[in-house]
Image: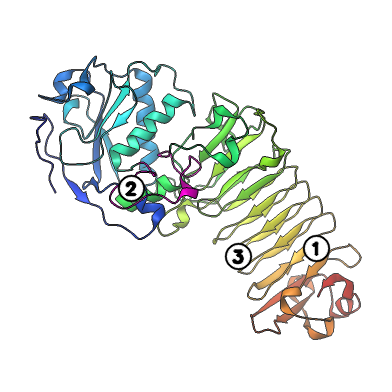
Amino acid sequence: MTRANNAFGADVRNEMSIANNIPTGNRAIDGLIHQYKWSSNIITYSFPSSLSDYGDNYPIDYIADFKGVAKGVKEKAREFFREIEKVINVKFYEYEADPGRAIIRIAQSRVKNPCAYLPDTHHCAGDVWLPITDDYCELNEGGFEHHAIRHEIGHALGLKHPHDSGAFGTLPQEQDSSRFTVMSYNTYRDYWSLGCSRGEHPQSFMPLDVLALQALYGPPALSPNSGIDSLYSWDPLKGHSFRDGQYRKKASGDYVFETIVDDGGWDTFDFSNFTRDLNIDLRPGGASHVMPRFLKYGETAEQMVVCTPMSPRDDPRFFIEAAIGGAGNDAMKGNCGPNHLRGGGGHDRINGYAGDDRLEGDDGDDVLWGGRGDDFMAGGTGRNLFYITPGDGHDVIEDFKRGSGNVIDLRRFGITAPEDVKMLDTPAFGGSVTLHLVAFNGEGEAKLTLIGMTVQEVRADPAMFLF
């Protein structure tokens, strides 16, 4: 479909093409996408400095007191376009010599609120307007003006408000918040309701934004950082973000609220600086944050929500593969790829979820469950519980010792005594015993290797099992 001139009058732009969107059947996508999108994978943008860049008969409400945007707005918008290029198959180019011909044009005027036109067939489509009454000179990470630019660019690319029915319905109510999308009017109620007003606005596009944009324009064709390993960390008191020890974002407040979109390599979330209990979730769309029950009303220290992106086919390029917990009692979940999860201090609960994982409890009394796949586990110091279930694959416990207080939970198998378990001394790892576990109820089976132990030692110590 080709855009046409409408009742607003002539346009100075070249013809732009749009395409119909097709509902996917996934409400997490359909609830965010507009009826149309730009048909090209090359999208231009500009910062007009003259009313003549908008042609004749443009709606007066939008051009009254027209003003070109400040340098800071331009820099921030360029940053956002680079951010989007990392997750979709689109290249953005700035029109400087002839700004009126760009698809997305960003300027200020007498509008009451920030606004933008969605992709469509009229000549205002793609235009972003910011109020001259708002302060866009200082764009603080997570501040309203900072958030407004990102939100309106989302509209210009074809994202709608999740509460508007549009062509394909609304977003599920439980996902209609800034935890999932910058297009929502609702704050992350489960977290920021504690009186942390400075944390209302995300500092990046959020998981469902990535999902919806990839549904519109496809994932990136090539990954410029593919194969590069990255370590992400945060300052829990000041909110600064780091990548491989270098400043990645300098927070203007003292909170963290962002989605990390990485594009290849072995990547790690390092929360070892945090002292309070954390919920760490590496699954697509998961959120890692300080447990809300440990935050006090109005307190800002250690306020953090770090999300992982979502993609239509769970593209592993966007996975975070590893995480390091803090000093508190953390809950950690991996994803369907290979993961390395370390609990750090405290009494942690670590679930590898799926894939071939390495789980380390480190200090404290920890619970470790490899999940599906062939996993290596080490409890570390303390009295640890290893959870084994039917279908888990072939797991290995590296540091299980008699008399250590460690326990293996086999209750899901319906086994009542060690005699019900087939055991075999194996030469692997310099000497070990392998247990062949078969569920009595037919749910499945699993294998478990205990390094440094023998069949005789295992049979002599039934207290190491929970039946």
In this image, 223 relative to 227: left or right? left
Q: On the image, which quarter does residue 104 sit in? A: top left
Q: Which quadrant of the figure contains the C terminus?
A: bottom right
Q: Is residue 219 visible?
A: no
In this picture, residue 68 sits left or right of residue 187: left
Quadrant position of residue 160? top left
Cα separation between marks 1 and 3? 18 Å
Instruction: Give how far apart the Cα atoms at labels 2 and 3 are.
Output: 42 Å
Residue under the point 39% across and 55% down: 27
**Where does label 3 land, which residue?**
356
Camera-nearest residue between 76 and 429: 76
Please say if the residues under marks 1 and 2 sit with CB atoms less than 8 Å apart.
Answer: no
Residue identifier under label 2: 165
| Magenta span of residues | 161-184
Q: Amino acid at mark 2?
A: Ser
Disc assigned to residue 118: none
Chief secondary structure of the magenta portion: loop
The three-letter code of the residue at mark 3 reads Asp
Q: To which residue does mark 1 refer?
A: 399
Q: Please say if the residues under marks 1 and 3 sit with CB atoms less than 8 Å apart.
A: no
231 inside magenta stretch: no
Circle 2 sits in a helix, a strand or a loop, which is it?
loop
Please state the horizontal and vertical placement of residue 313, each as a whole percent of the image.
41, 60
Which kind of residue does numbered mark 1 sit on?
Asp
Helix, strand or loop at label 1? It is: loop
Q: Is label 3 in a helix, a strand or a loop?
A: loop
Residue 78 lies, with reference to residue 66, above or below; the image says below
Nearest to the observer: residue 200 or residue 240: 200
Is 207 drawn above or below residue 203 in the view shown? below
